[in-house]
Amino acid sequence: MHQDADTKAAKNGIIGTGRGRLMATIASIAIAGAVGVGVVTSGTAPVMAEAVRLDQPVQAPSFADIVEKVSPAVVSVRVKADVEMTSNRGGSSFFDMPGFEELPDGHPLKRFFREFRGERDFGNDRRYQRRHRPRPVSQGSGFFISEDGYLVTNNHVVNGGSNFTVVMDDGTEIDAELVGTDPRTDLAVLKVDEKREFTYVDFADEAKVRVGDWVVAVGNPFGLGGTVTAGIVSARGRDIGAGPYDDFIQIDAAVNRGNSGGPAFNLTGEVVGINTAIFSPSGGNVGIAFAIPASVAKEVVRDLIENGSVERGWLGVQIQPVSKDIAESVGLDEEKGALVADAQDGEPAAKAGIRSGDIIVAVGDKPVSSPKELARLVADFAPGNEVDVTLWRDGKTENVKVTLSEMPGVESMAAARGDSQSSTMDAQFGLKVTPAEDGDGLVVTDVEPGSPADDRGIRPGDIIRAVNSQTVKSGKDVEDAVSAAVKAGRKAVLVQIEREDASRFVALPTSEG
């Protein structure tokens, strides 16, 4: 009985121990499930953590409402030019064969070569009479700005064209007439004459556009028709060297060939810019596009509709930026204004007394921060207006009144240089000079590599006309001007350089600087 009792006790102990282990295992699995850890046991499925799930979906921005409203106002612009099929009359033969032109028009050899090069002017055969045929030359985008059919596009889209077709959002094709163009801002206006009210859009108050704002571009990339892309305003005031009034808005909405002339909208459906250029090493979209600001387009478009062209005021000066060295050399506290490199004879600025070396710091009551700013401010005035111009001259400000003229076309300039002969020069600048043949100025004959003159782009053949607004005819004149600058505590002197009849200024450091 004692043995049976012990055996029974042992069995009970074993059974008890197994039950405890089983309960511990179940508890472990329950705890692991609670903390998100799966435990794999033989014959038992793992307990997984609960998946992440939001109670409500994230509301991403949708541009569908804007696109629905503005798309009927955006069009594709197809441009063709009249071309006349080439005739070999009066020209050279296909193979420049002697006597080829003397062959009769009906000669099989002459007919063969004319057929070969596409000529179809065979005597009186009406099937081959020459005709003017419109040939596609470009395509782009545009948008209506009035319900009676005025629309805006780029000048480079319509340039060279004689036939213009507007393709509406619904596929309707309508002929259009060219109202006017402005190459300097790359804008053009077309007019559609049809008895219907067109959906049109308005220009935004572009001054309120901020970097980071959403924009939606609608256009005709690669001739695909109405295509919508979206992005943000990446930067403002971009100068890409396209013209004298560059002030582009940079956007990262996808813009490609064919988008030119199309609008970039804000979230209220107003046009903040007109897509006109892209930066693209590959030729395709890389997320850098440039749009003409609404503020510029609005004024130009108004003038084109009213006058067919844009009239801008003209000063008649060559200008350059004011660098830190230049500002220091003339006593300006900061780098601002536009330095007059040359005031052209007979033009408004010269007539008003503005001369080389003056720095224009304001037009009217508006300060001039750069040459680009000066160009835009003057262009805002119509020819014939009298404007107040504030100058920085001889260490103080002066005011002059200038009556603006109309901006002329580009004029060619004749090159003029003096020959180098024996040399003499101020060693501190690292250049050698000789008197100019006309007795006015010094011709640079040699520039020492790595010298201050070399660093600032002076090269042999340049003519030094003045130093610190004082004309120079000898090395001594230069030394005197430098000495005067040193006495005045200046660290640089302003040197007027003439190259190929174009004048500019550079600041050369004095020995004290």
Image (tube, rainbow, N blue to C red):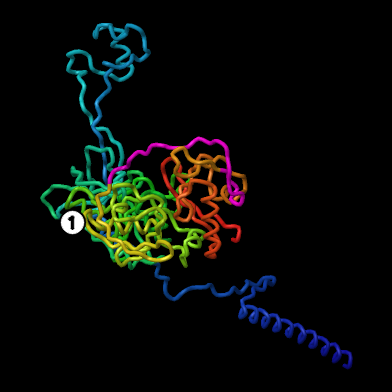
| Residue toward you, 454 or 195 | 454
Residue 298 part of the magenta segment? no
Residue 431 part of the magenta segment? yes
Q: Which residue is drawn at 61% across and 74% down?
A: 47
Q: Picture coordinates of residue 162 (x, y %)?
A: 22, 37
**Vertically, is 4 above or below 461?**
below
Q: Picture coordinates of residue 126 (x, y %)?
A: 17, 17
Q: Quadrant of residue 252?
A: bottom left
Q: In terms of secondary structure, what is the magenta stretch mainly? A: loop
Which range of residues does the magenta coloring cover? 408-432
| Residue toward you, 506 or 130 | 506
Can residue 453 be seen in the rendering of this structure?
yes
Quarter the C terminus occupies: bottom right
Assign a secondary structure to mark 1: loop
For label 1, the crowd category at 10 Å Cα-Cα, with few meaning under 14, some 14 to 19 and many 20 or more, is some
Can residue 69 be seen in the rendering of this structure?
no
Q: Mark 1 points at which residue?
A: 146
